[in-house]
Amino acid sequence: MESRVKAFGHAIHPMLIVFPLGLLATAVVFDILHLITDRSGFAVAAAYAIAAGIIGGLVAALPGWIDWSAIPAGTRAKRVGLFHGAGNMLVLLLFAVSWLLRVNAGDWVPGAWALIFGFAGVAIAGVTGWLGGELVERLGVGVDDGAGLQAPSSLSHNKTTRRGRVRHEPS
């Protein structure tokens, strides 16, 4: 099943999710560094990374939701996609609570609850990331119908069939 939201022949959702995942994971690394060194700069960096990760996650969610809505009802892919999307919304919520707790502290230094919410968020993101991989790698969601080891470039006007034959399309 091909993605509904593409740029230059490639699904946009997988391109966008790397940013929020990286930012939120980096925020947890900054929190750990803050705990080890007690340097407030790491706490501030974590808060900024969380804010950017939440914004990026919301931006990535839109094409993901559009692609999910195109999956046929009653399929395993629809169920996996639902858990993937709902889990990622939970991740964003957990990090948003962590961020709000830091703001309310006044100095961006995370208390125990802010850390717990962030650590839980990154753990759940690992599970939802695996579910996203299951959607693409196992169930073929978002994969071009003509994908294959010998498929022409996505920028080409030629399409490859599942049997590996090149179908020439007029420009």
Image: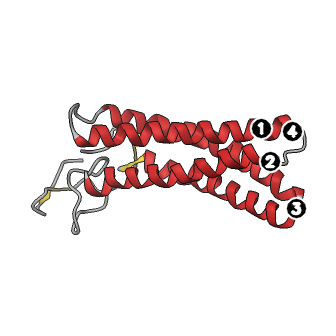
Label 4 neighbourhood size at 10 Å, few (<14), some (14-19), many (20+)?
few
**Alpha carbons under labels 4 and 3: distance apart:** 16 Å
Element at label 1:
helix
The residue carrying mark 1 is 101
What percent of the width, then of the height, locates residue 158? 21, 56
Q: How many numbered dots are placed on residues in this image? A: 4
Give whichever of 1, 49 is nearer the camera.
49
The kind of residue on which mark 2 rests is: Pro
Q: Is residue 101 above or below residue 22?
A: above
Nearer-N-terminus badge (4/3): 3
Residue shown at the point (38%, 33%) measured from the top left: 66
Q: Measuring 90% from the left and 38% from the top, which residue is drawn there?
A: 106
**Picture coordinates of residue 47, whole percent (x, y):** 76, 47
Asked whether the residues under the numbered discs 3 and 1 touch, taking CB atoms below 8 Å apart as contact, a structural biologist would say no
Q: Where is residue 84 in the image (x, y as percent from the top left)?
A: 41, 43
Give the amino acid type for the residue marked by disc 4 in the picture: Ala
User: In this figure, which residue is indicated by the disc labeled 2?
Assistant: 110
**Do the residues under discs 2 and 1 have CB atoms within 8 angstroms?**
yes
Distance in Å between CA atoms under marks 2 and 3: 11 Å
Q: Is residue 117 left or right of residue 79?
A: right
**Mark 4–mark 3 contact, CB under 8 Å?**
no
Q: How far apart are marks 4 and 1 (CA)?
A: 6 Å
Which residue is the site of mark 3? 38
Local secondary structure at mark 3: loop
Name the side, left or right, on which 84 lies relative to 115.
left
Earlier residue among tags 3 and 1:
3
Mark 3, Cα crowd under 10 Å, few <14 / some 14-19 / many 20+, is few
Q: 10 Å neighbourhood of mark 2: few (<14), some, or many (≥20)?
A: many
Q: Tag on residue 105?
A: 4
* Residue 9 point in image, percent of width and height: 35, 50
